[in-house]
């Protein structure tokens, strides 16, 4: 009889957001009068900006006429979008990225999950802890994680704790990992690394032959000068790093789906015989074989983001969320909470009070203040003792939530 | 140093459509006066139908207002679409499929490519020959194909020839494969299997414990009564088969991307210890971890296909293509070519004249008749000696192409 991929059977149920939803539902059913403010899920709430809406309508009309109809597009994305990415996201920041190094996709979750297809199962992985669960779970599926230990860690994955003790700056690995995932601005902590700190990581990878998978999904939230927008701002990064970008948080594309991945031509790994193999053609082959391009509509929508109005409108939306984050930082601090993030990120990472666990703190937030957060322990063992709040609610609700905490 | 997935380095360059494009370009540059008719690529050309266009505009407007904005949707698809699929694509044909057995995605190419994620690398694969190259290439990437032989076959894949000699009906495998890919109506031959023939395959899989991956991307083209629209019309298929469906050819969604996959709850494989493991939760876990849902816009567009106007408009478009196919079958036959397909399919599979190879025939079609086809050998060793023509051009051009062949 045919056999399943056993690695899937090792995965514990992913219960974080479903357990959050269950507890919220139970509470609101028991207390229908409670006005619950949701600051848990990392999804945007502001509508798409007018420049994108106009472009989407035009693209729909293109699909209504034979002369302008677009069927299968290039699997790696349309030139009209890629040329804008290369110009606005890179060249204007002093970075050279070639058009055939950019691969447009339906989102960074797909790409960070699928990138393992082109890597050997024998690679050892390192992740920061807490971490976006996709990095870990997809490596479990691929058979790279080993066994789940009682402490919640996988035996073949090296965890790099990011906690108040080290200022949320991960130490370098000790186990010589082959592949290192970094997400900055970070999900879930909202913290960043400076140019010099990122240079340390690029240098580490160059010295040790490690691949740096750099998730820059929250890049658009960066407002401080010393925080790089792209890993390629760091000298030598093209030889060691793949960068993932997303329009989800940048422009509210969580529902219409778009992202892209940059695979520089200098980036090479080794095959089993020790020969150097470039990753760019491998990813191209993966995408042309297992993916059929992102929606024409969404690619036209993204193109409009690079117009003058598009750039201004997107910045206004992100400024709105960042204003919420500033309200949260101030409110939390005045209410006696320690927190980080929220400056170059929509996420604020909060230390639970009085040594509570993440879930105890979740329940207290919900029951005493009618605020929904996300328990930090859901993001990994080092997330225990924290919870995450997001800036994606309205300003009005954000102000209201903070005034509740201060009471 | 980190290691790449060696299996990628075994893949020969995929040169079929790029070589076709190169030869067409060279010819048209040398003969700018030639009016070339393209019947090679399997992409639709008719615009999206009005019901879909209206729904897409409404969905774009939803994304313009905070109250109707849709961010992250369910990874497995929205209920508003899944309920329509269950009702119209299955229940009305007498088939019971549950809503949580349907997984909406960005297309059947992604799903047929990604399905291998939940299967052991140790499974042996069988494919019909000629075949949609994605089935073979994705198994090469996963390490299931073995080595490429001089005859163009992979050592660990069993090929089931479909040629004029066996009436394009594959014989049952002899090598006890664990996983069998069938695509009916077939790409590239345009042939179908009868209900009784498909029952033979389901029975084979039940007896041998094989998984049947059934690609029904061309289902909407079926016009004959004895050709099942779904593998689940066959008794017992729920225990052995996954079905892939696509809106690409059904409704012209090649550019806006949508498909779905059905994984019945009865379907089980074995883990390494021999325990039975249901595939439905495995695919759910794969999709929720490595995919973030299809575009909200496209899902609203697909929903509109199930309205009365949508159903009528889609049928009109497919009838248009099928009328082209009928013109092709008649014209080819009158011109002395042997061909199959084109009755329940947009593809006509043509025997090359006078023992020519597929590429010789391609060149002659282009140079003598200014018609672009696809060389059958690009779809596998048993495609040698054939070429594929598609019904996706205009009626006018299709008529013109056939009258050229008759001269």
Image (spheres, coloured by chain):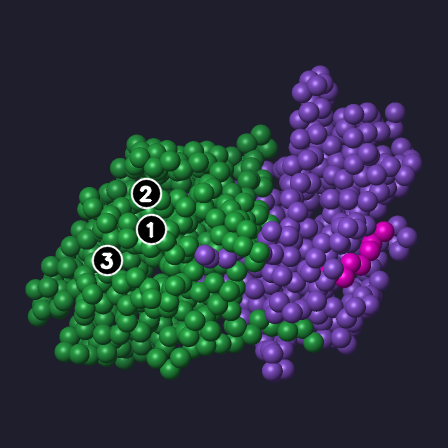
Chain colours: A green, B purple
- In the rendered structure, the answer to whether residue B114 lies left or right of residue A184 reads right
Q: Which residue is mark 1?
A: A202
The residues tagged by marks 1 and 2 sit, at their Cα atoms, a distance apart of 8 Å
Percent across and percent down for residue A3 are 64, 73
Sequence order check, earlier mark of 1 and 3: 3
The residues tagged by marks 3 and 2 sit, at their Cα atoms, a distance apart of 22 Å
| Chain of the residue under label 2 | A
The numbered dot on residue B278 is none
The numbered dot on residue A191 is 3
Q: Is residue B161 magenta?
A: yes
Q: Which residue is mark 2?
A: A235
Q: Is residue B325 magenta?
A: no
Residue in the image at 90% along x and 39% along y = B355
Closest to the observer: A325 or B253? A325
| Chain of the residue under label 3 | A
| Chain of the residue under label 1 | A
Our reading of the magenta stretch's main secondary structure is strand
Q: Quadrant of residue A398?
A: bottom left
Q: Quadrant of residue A163?
A: bottom left
Sequence order check, earlier mark of 3 and 2: 3
Q: Decide: marks 3, 2 in contact (CB < 8 A)?
A: no
Residue in the image at 77% along x and 71% along y = B176
Q: Nearer the viewer, mark 3 or mark 2?
A: 2
- In the rendered structure, the answer to whether residue A66 lies left or right of residue B295 reads right
Closest to the observer: B111 or B30? B30
Q: Can residue B132 be seen by looking at this rendering?
A: yes
């Amino acid at each position: 009889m045919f056999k399943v991929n056993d690695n899937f059977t090792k995965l514990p149920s992913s219960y974080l957001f479903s357990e959050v939803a269950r507890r919220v539902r139970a509470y609101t059913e028991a207390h229908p009068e409670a006005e619950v403010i949701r600051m848990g899920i990392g999804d945007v709430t502001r509508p798409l900006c007018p420049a994108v809406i106009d472009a989407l309508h035009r693209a729909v009309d293109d699909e209504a006429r034979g002369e302008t109809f677009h069927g299968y597009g290039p699997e790696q994305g349309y030139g009209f979008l890629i040329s804008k990415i290369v110009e606005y996201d890179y060249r204007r920041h002093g970075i050279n990225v070639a058009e055939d190094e950019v691969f447009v996709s339906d989102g960074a979750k797909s790409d960070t999950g699928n990138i393992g297809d082109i890597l050997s199962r024998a690679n050892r992985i390192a992740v920061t802890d807490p971490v976006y669960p996709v990095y870990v779970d997809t490596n479990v599926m691929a058979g790279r994680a080993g066994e789940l230990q009682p402490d919640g860690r996988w035996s073949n994955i090296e965890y790099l704790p990011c906690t108040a003790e080290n200022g949320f700056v991960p130490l370098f690995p000790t186990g010589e990992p082959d592949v290192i995932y970094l997400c900055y601005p970070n999900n879930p902590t909202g913290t960043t690394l400076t140019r010099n700190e990122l240079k340390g990581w690029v240098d580490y990878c160059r010295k040790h032959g490690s691949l740096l998978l750099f998730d820059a999904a929250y890049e658009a939230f960066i407002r401080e000068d010393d925080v790089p927008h792209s890993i390629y701002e760091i000298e030598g990064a093209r030889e060691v790093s793949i960068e993932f970008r997303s329009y989800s948080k940048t422009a509210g594309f969580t529902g219409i789906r778009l992202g892209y991945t940059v695979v520089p031509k200098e980036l090479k790994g080794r095959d089993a015989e020790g020969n150097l193999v470039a990753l760019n053609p491998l990813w191209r082959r993966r995408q042309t074989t297992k993916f059929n391009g992102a929606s024409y509509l969404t690619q036209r929508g993204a193109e409009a983001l690079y117009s003058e109005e598009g750039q201004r409108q997107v910045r206004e939306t992100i400024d709105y969320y960042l204003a919420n984050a500033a309200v949260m930082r101030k409110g939390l601090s005045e209410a006696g909470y320690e927190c980080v993030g929220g400056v170059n990120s929509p996420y604020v990472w909060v230390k639970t009070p009085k040594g509570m666990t993440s879930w105890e703190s979740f329940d207290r937030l919900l029951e005493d203040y009618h605020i929904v957060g996300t328990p930090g322990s859901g993001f990994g063992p080092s997330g225990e003792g924290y919870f995450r709040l997001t800036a994606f609610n309205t300003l009005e609700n954000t102000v209201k939530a903070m005034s509740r905490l201060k009471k």
